[in-house]
Image (cartoon, rainbow, N blue to C red):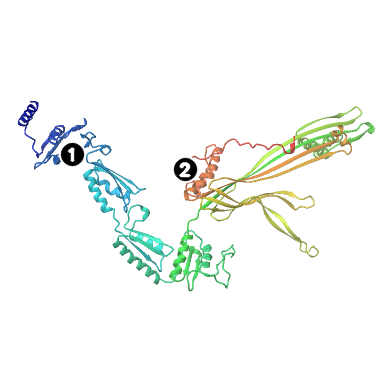
Amino acid sequence: MTRLISALLVALGLVLAPPAVAQQQTLNYQNADIRAVVQDIARVTGRTFIVDQSVQGTVTVVSNQPLSRTEMFEVFVSTLRANGLVVAQTSSGAYRISPAEGASSLPGAAGVVTEVFRLRTVDAVAAAEVLRPLVSPVGQVLPNPGGNTLTVADYADNLRRIRGLLSQLDQDHSSVQTVSLTNTSAREIADVLTRVMGLATAEAGGSTILSVTPVESSNSVVLRGDPEVISRALSLIADLDARAGTSGDIRVIHLQHASAEQLLPVLQQLVGQTPAVPAGEDAATGSAAGAPAAGVGGGNVSIARYPGANALIIAANPETQRTLAEVIRQLDTRRQQVLVEAIVVEVSDNAAQQLGVQFLLGGGEDGQIPFMATNYSNSAPNLLAITGALIADDELPEDSGLLESLREAAINSLTGATGITAGIGGQNDNGALFGFILNAIRRDTASNLLSTPSVMTLDNEEATFLGGQEVPVSTGEVLGDANSNPFRTIERRNVGVQLDVTPQINAGGGITLALRVEVSSVAGPISEDYQELIFNKREVTTTVLADDGDIVVLGGLLDQNERVSVQGVPYLQDIPGVGALFRSRGREAQRTNLMIFLRPTIIRSAGDAQRVSARPFEALVGQQRLNDPNGRSSLEALVREYMQDEPPSAGGPVATFPQTPIESQPLPPVGGAE
């Protein structure tokens, strides 16, 4: 019974069911509300749409023939895309309609697909520039130069067109051709092809129509590119190489950086000739005369230089000319410079102490008391000079010249006293004179003798700095027969601070310094009878390795001297206790330490040279501005007036010196002197 009722209900449902929707329909919407259109499409296609609340506006779509459900859905999606909307399928099977902005980041976006293309021959950056105008506004093109890949996000139909375009672009239709040269240089031919044919080089990035690579070892060029372009390049290369073979056997090469005088002997040695030695140099590397060494090329080769134009003239066959020209090209390069800044510090510490006792006793009526006095040259003031002035003041008239001399000697003795001076003196009833002077002094001096030489020189070129004097030194004397024609030979010796340095820039950025530093001074004559001079000299000769801009410390030459002088009355000065009244004692200690600080800096460009030149200039200008009441610098005005140019500047604030001097710290006492 139940089965019968169910069958009747099913049959009744079939009879009462509405007619099926037509399989094909036409579209005709004129400025229709987009939400109404979505409802109609959902009803016809049987799909579920989720409309974002920001979706607003009207659409117009017309079809001239009936469309199936699938075709109608595709037309609907295209209509939304034309109006800035995108359809994205969710995980539940429904479709979400939202604005196209950011649609490429939505998962499952209908028609929005991301694909990665790995390119074989085309550069990824260049391909991205070609494809960017072809993608839709919601699409993105991201190149990856490291892996030469291209990431494209766009609608599925547009991505299919991009895929087909890339397949046509990413094909290597170029050919490779190697051309051996006979008369010309491979690098020269490569430069000519690049300039004349307007070709892009490989360094410019991207694919090129023709790539020209010189191979210097075999004197050939490798061409890679379109066969038609290679054919035109081959005809040009053949013409240039043939013209070079018939252009003559003499070639003039103008040098840009190297010296023709220094380069000439090197080239002569290469061709087996005895090299010409530049002025001031030896021929240690030259070939012996009469025994030519084996060299490049063949036949007669002659090389000369023209000093006026710093040029070399080569007379040889084309092959030898090409070889020598390539050697010249590699040697004729801009050389780097090195700035060597040095600080030579001489720190001296002197400590001296003196203790002297002088006394005088004598005179009286009828010479009752014998005259007795002590006097020492290392003690001041002089008791005898003072006593003589006092006696003369009572005995001699005022207009006496002797009185004036004795007074002047006493005054000089008093003004020359240092330290503490104490004494008593007078005359008793019998007219006897007595006096006693005690002088004690301790003297400590500490001084920094600072010299800051700075030299700039080319790589592997010696530079010398000298700050001092030329002192005449007698080297010989000839009296002649019976003193008829006496004469003396004099040699002048440099005395002061001298720096000789030869820098060599290494491949790793280090600098090898072959240097010699000398600090010398005149100590004075040997003795009063022998007037030849004694020179104090400290010298450092070494080779060190330093990095660019690092500071190297040399020296530490310590010189220590101590001198003790004692003057006194014989026998009496040795009496314990009382003997101190009959002697004067002095002690002096001196210690000198020499330190040298070096900092090499590589000057690679004009900007580096400008900066290192600006540092000392701005320091001097800053010092002058501090000393000038109006804050002006005469040096700066001098440069502008006479050189008609702006002073060097490092681009920063002007350096200034501190207004208060920096006090040096004294060394500890030498030898325990107190």
Q: Nearer the viewer, residue 337 or 610?
A: 337
Residue 328: x %, y % from top left: 47, 63
Q: Nearer the viewer, residue 236 or 6?
A: 6
Q: Quadrant of residue 285?
A: bottom right
Quadrant (top left, top right, bottom left, bottom right) of the N terminus: top left
Residue at position x 57%, y 37% from top?
658
Residue 494: x %, y % from top left: 66, 53
| Residue marked by disc 1 | 77
The answer to whether 300 is drawn above or below residue 16 in the figure is below
The answer to whether 668 is drawn above or below residue 559 in the figure is above
Residue furthest to the left in view is: 15
The mark found on residue 651 in the picture is 2
Crowd around label 1: few <14 · some 14–19 · many ≥20 (10 Å): some
Q: Is residue 398 visible?
A: no
Label 2 is placed on what type of residue? Gly
- The residues bearing labels 2 and 1 have C-alpha atoms spaced at a distance of 62 Å
Mark earlier in primary sequence (2, 1)? 1
Crowd around label 2: few <14 · some 14–19 · many ≥20 (10 Å): few
Question: What is the secondary structure assignment of the residue under circle 2?
Answer: loop
